[in-house]
Amino acid sequence: MLSRCLTLIRDTAQIPSFSSYEERIHPYIYSVSEQIEGCESITVDQRNLMLRIPGKKNGRIALSAHLDKINHFGEKPPQRLPYEQHETFLRGQLDNTAGIGIILTLAELAAEREWPELLILLSEMEESTGLREHPELMRNRGKGLHHGMGAERLARHLIEESLFPDAVITVDTTPLFKGKPGCALYAGHWEFTKTEPSDTERARTDALTASLLALDPHLYRANNTNDYLTYGKVLNTETDDTIDVPSVAVEPAIHPYHQKNEQVFTADIERVLRLLALFLDTYENRD
């Protein structure tokens, strides 16, 4: 499981799929999804992808990661970005190829596990750094683009198709550990989105975080900004249905952050991978 995950991270980390050019990574994602039994793959609004994998027990869980990288390489980036694998860590453009590798590994495992249906959500434009600092390096010089638009589009697609997940778990990378290993659990999107959760959404979020903490009690409870906020806000405020979908994020440490040569500890990748696999193993839809 870990070996395959590291291969997926290596392959995706080398692709220059910078913000607004996420389609560069699509062929690789589709080459993976085509080998997954029963997987339905679709493109959403040109640069976002959704993989739908049938389950073997009741329930539907969405796993999300963002496709875009920050362009630290200028107008003429290399065709293959630098990447290194060391004994205890990886080095390269790992925000968010670490998350992509983890959830694609889980997608591949689904065929042999008794898991609920999986929705793999892969979004454009999660990063705001490039748009803020170097819009000239982006498609149409950044016109018509905004941070979080991919997660918005994917969440609205789920609403349009009535594909409401029991929960959304985003896998990204966290800077909170400042060079040390660790894994964080973010919850409570309303602290940033300034929305008011229903009692049911709050209770379901508490239950989801409790389930994850029961499986890994040493997760660092925190909060920060990424696509998990967008999924939580859109799914719970932009539909007439009362669906109360909990949205959280589970994140391995990264350092330095939003720079070249980011490093992620291999043990943290394995930790998140095993946590989510165990969560899916033990998941029970109680509705």
Image (cartoon, rainbow, N blue to C red):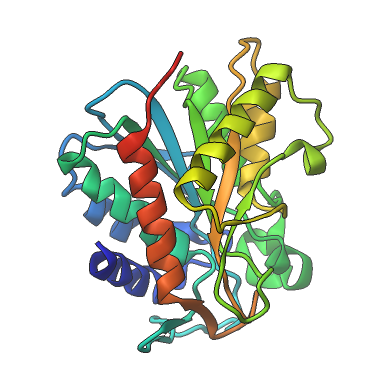
Residue 198 horizontal side relative to residue 39, left or right: right
- Count of all numbered marks drawn on residues in the image: 0
**Horizontal and vertical percent position of residue 22:** 48, 58
Q: Is residue 50 above or below residue 264?
A: above
In the image, what residue occupies the spot 57% across and 70% down?
A: 253
Residue 200 horizontal side relative to residue 112, left or right: right
In the image, what residue occupies the spot 58% across and 48% down?
A: 249
Residue 239 horizontal side relative to residue 79, left or right: right
In the image, what residue occupies the spot 44% across and 22% down?
A: 163
- Quarter of the figure with residue 37: top left
Camera-side residue of 2 and 210? 210
**Horizontal and vertical percent position of residue 23:** 43, 57
Residue 51 in view, yes or no: no
**Horizontal and vertical percent position of residue 106:** 31, 50
In the image, what residue occupies the spot 49% across and 26% down?
A: 158
Q: Identify the image quadrant of the N terminus.
A: bottom left
- Quarter of the figure with residue 11: bottom left
Q: Is residue 268 above or below residue 223?
A: below
Residue 254 in view, yes or no: yes
Q: Is residue 59 above or below residue 123?
A: above
Q: Is residue 229 above or below residue 95?
A: above
- From this viewpoint, which residue is outermost toward the top? 241
**Horizontal and vertical percent position of residue 268:** 46, 69
